Image (cartoon, grey):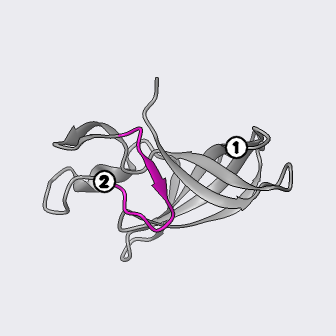
Amino acid sequence: MGFFNTVSVKEKCPECGELATLDFQIKTACSSFGDANGRFAMRYYKVGETLRWWPASDERYNSFVEGVDYVLVDADAHLVRERAHGGCEKCDANLQAEVFIRDLKLEKIESIGSYQADYFVD
């Protein structure tokens, strides 16, 4: 089983057209390791929340994008765009989106659409 975190957003589903909770799996700041509060994995977040991770003073801090299919949008601002796979709570549609994370804060989710098999291939 792979480790991931889930980010949820209330949006109109591109498949059923209903306002629904759409969940997307992300791997940014995801690890089987953790701190006193548990692993940095299998957690649920909403846009605006900050991902739990090692503090910036820890040598492991910069590993928050290891193994992630991402694009570094702005290195100075620590802004990454992760491609994410997800689904709709109402119709179980297979979806994809781009999740923007700045300094480990979930900034926004864009480009929500129906899953395309080649979306995750560069």
Q: x%, y% of residue 81?
A: 53, 61
Give the percent coordinates (x, y) of residue 5.
45, 44
Q: Hey, which quadrant is residue 98 in on the image?
A: bottom right
Front-most of residues 89 and 47: 89
Q: In this view, does 55 lie to the left or right of 84?
A: left
Q: Residues within 10 Å of mark 1 (few under 14, many from 20)?
A: some
Rendered image quadrant of residue 35 = top left
In the image, what residue occupies the spot 72% across and 54% down?
20
Residue 12, relative to residue 31: is it above or below?
Answer: below
Q: Which amino acid is tagged 2?
A: Arg
Q: Mark 2 points at which residue?
A: 52
In the displayed structure, 54 sits above or below 87; it is below
Residue with the mark numbered 1: 89
Left or right of 89 in this view: 61 = left
Q: What stretch is highlighted in magenta?
A: 41-52
Mark closer to the chain start, 2 or 1: 2
Q: Circle 1 — which element? A: loop
Q: Residues within 10 Å of mark 2 (few under 14, many from 20)?
A: some
Q: Is residue 104 left or right of residue 1?
A: left
The reply to whether the magenta stretch includes residue 86 is: no
